[in-house]
Amino acid sequence: MTLSEELRYRGFYNQTTFESPEALDEGTYTLYLGTDPSADSLHVGHLAVYMMVRRFLDHGHKVILLVGGGTGMIGDMRDTEERVLKPLEEIEHNKKALAAQVSQLFSGQSFELVDNYDWLADVQLLPFLRDIGKAFSMNELTSREFYKARTGGDNSSGLSYAEFSYTILQGYDYLHLHREKSVNLQIGGSDQWGNLLSGVELIRKKTGDVVHALSSPLVVNRATGRKFGKSESGAVWLDPDQTSVFKFYQFWLNVDDESAIDYLKLFTLMDRLTIEELAEQHAKDPGKREAQRTLAYEVTKLVHGTARAEQARNVTAALFGDTPFSQLLDEEIEMLALEIPVTASGNLVNALVTSGVTTSNGEARRLISGGGISINGAKVSEDVQLKAPSLIKKGKNTFILVR
């Protein structure tokens, strides 16, 4: 497939300044994607745009990944309220963490990593306003959706000049990278569309050059109607210290049937033929959840590496009876120990009570005698002494690890 065909097939081709998708196939682009250090990790909501950039790499285009050490000191505008300014030490920490994370995500690929603090820190106010500020029309800036959301109506929170200036700084980033590194395409999420256009227009006015912008779509969880990557407990992070590898795997494993194939296109490196074959299998027997299983493994492998993805897959299989618990390796048991209650070896009744599965010894004995408990996949009918390691299971989703 050509790049334009692939972007459309996978659902990436969204808002753009290109007159037609085929324009992407007619030349070589140097593109950039920027991320501000508002946190010390990306979450899966960011992942679609990074996967979009990965497609450009695979088709031979040059990629620059920008960490916004400069713009992060101001903070991108939000539709609801102004961001709280972060301490400089936190910005520096977040910047280093994000740089390491994007480098890992694109490991083995050829790209350049830059920090806009390196040029924004030296900007002088009066020359900047005279040279750059004069290129922006207030009529155009105040017509953008973020401005209307923050300044319209009695319940609006207002907008500071610092935050309002963010779009000008991002436009200046594009101009700087165009001049210094011949960047001619900026990519971002659909919520960044106005900022992307700032750079396109600034470059046209200052240099006469025609450059382009292309956004990835906002991915919405069809089951919840919320932005993709948001769960009841918050964002699903790529950093394993914030969202464990096991929980990360489970997030993808539990997506709805309707979305699973779409997510395989967006978030994995699988080719079209393989995805379409899997889609056929999934349509014939969605109960097997082969699409979700493949999705969970492939995205976890991409973000956390093959070894950790295999561990998450094996632990999941042992929990839900697809493989014997006895086949788990020591490191897989260690992964499991971080996710479910753990008890020392002793008797089963005591384990059920101390782990909070039952509230009393009597309730535990009734549960056991009624066939409601299994150990390592085998039903038990009476209290027994436990051996480590073992897996106690009640129903479908309640577990205790004996160590």
Image: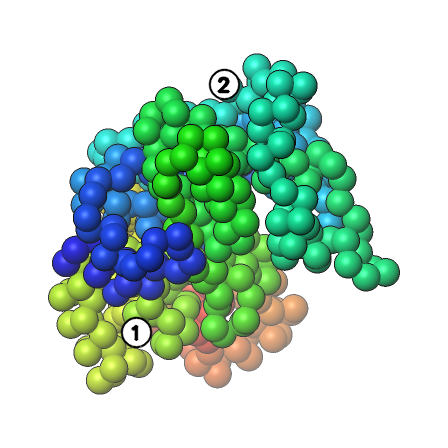
| Percent coordinates x, y for residue 327 in the rendering | 24, 55
Instruction: Please state which amino acid type lies under the numbered disc 2.
Output: Asp
Observer able to see residue 314: no
Write the residue at 81% across / 61% down.
153
Give the SS element for disc 1: loop
Q: Nearer the viewer, mark 2 or mark 1?
A: 2
| Percent coordinates x, y for residue 5 in the rendering | 21, 61
Going by the image, does 30 lie left or right of 349? left
Give the SS element for disc 2: helix
Viewer-proximal residue, 224 or 55? 55
Write the residue at 44% across / 38% down.
204
Q: Is residue 178 above or below residue 52?
A: above
Viewer-proximal residue, 261 or 51? 51
Instruction: Please state which amino acid type lies under the numbered disc 1.
Output: Arg
Q: Is residue 311 above or below residue 369?
A: above
Q: Is residue 369 above or below residue 345?
A: below
In three-dimensional space, the C-alpha distance between marks 2 and 1, rounded to whole angstroms, equals 48 Å
Viewer-proximal residue, 379 or 292? 292
Write the residue at 80% across / 51% down.
157
Q: Is residue 282 above or below residue 62?
A: below
| Percent coordinates x, y for residue 44 in the rendering | 45, 52
Write the residue at 50% across / 51% down.
193
| Label 2 crowd (10 A; few <14 / some 14-19 / many >=20) | few
Q: Please name the residue that numbered disc 2 is placed on.
A: 118
Residue 53: image tag: none
| Percent coordinates x, y for residue 177 in the rendering | 40, 28
Q: Earlier in the sequence, mark 2 or mark 1?
A: 2
Q: Residue furthest right?
A: 154
Q: Please name the residue that numbered disc 1 is placed on.
A: 289
Q: Quadrant of the N terminus?
A: bottom left
Is there a contact, CB below 8 Å, between mark 2 and mark 1? no
Colour pattern: rainbow
